[in-house]
Amino acid sequence: MTEGTQYYYNLSTGAVEEGAQSPATERMGPYATREEAERALSTAAKRNQEWEQDDEEWEEG
């Protein structure tokens, strides 16, 4: 993702930003497309759920 515009999801406003406009602590990304940035929270929630399941399986042996 070195070429082209990068998009970020602003955690404070819920808006998608073109380029890194907000402080790093207030944004998620970068994403290759605006649509990916719009789905940032649902993508993160899905990944967290998968990681939690992996942790449970690992702990169970």
Image (cartoon, grey):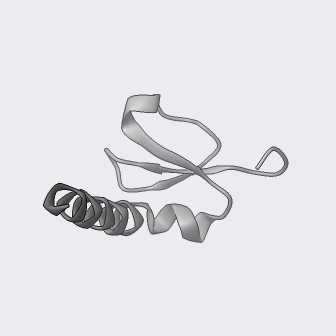
- The residue that appears at 81% across and 44% down in the rendered structure is 2
Image coords of residue 37 (percent x, y): 52, 61
- The residue that appears at 34% across and 47% down in the rendered structure is 11
Q: Quadrant of residue 31?
A: bottom right
- The residue that appears at 53% across and 47% down in the rendered structure is 29
Image coords of residue 6 (percent x, y): 68, 49
Q: Quadrant of the C terminus?
A: bottom left
Residue at the far right: name it.
3
Residue at the far left: name it.
60
Seen from the viewer's position, the closer of residues 1 and 39 is 1
Image coords of residue 5 (percent x, y): 75, 51
Seen from the viewer's position, the closer of residues 46 and 34 is 46
Q: How many numbered discs, if any?
A: 0
Seen from the viewer's position, the closer of residues 20 and 30 is 30
- The residue that appears at 37% across and 60% down in the rendered structure is 44
Query: Horizontal placement of 36 versus 45: left or right?
Result: right
Query: Horizontal placement of 52 versus 11: left or right?
Result: left
Image coords of residue 38 (percent x, y): 48, 66
Seen from the viewer's position, the closer of residues 52 and 22 is 52
Q: Quadrant of residue 14?
A: bottom left
Query: Horizontal placement of 7 versus 49: left or right?
Result: right
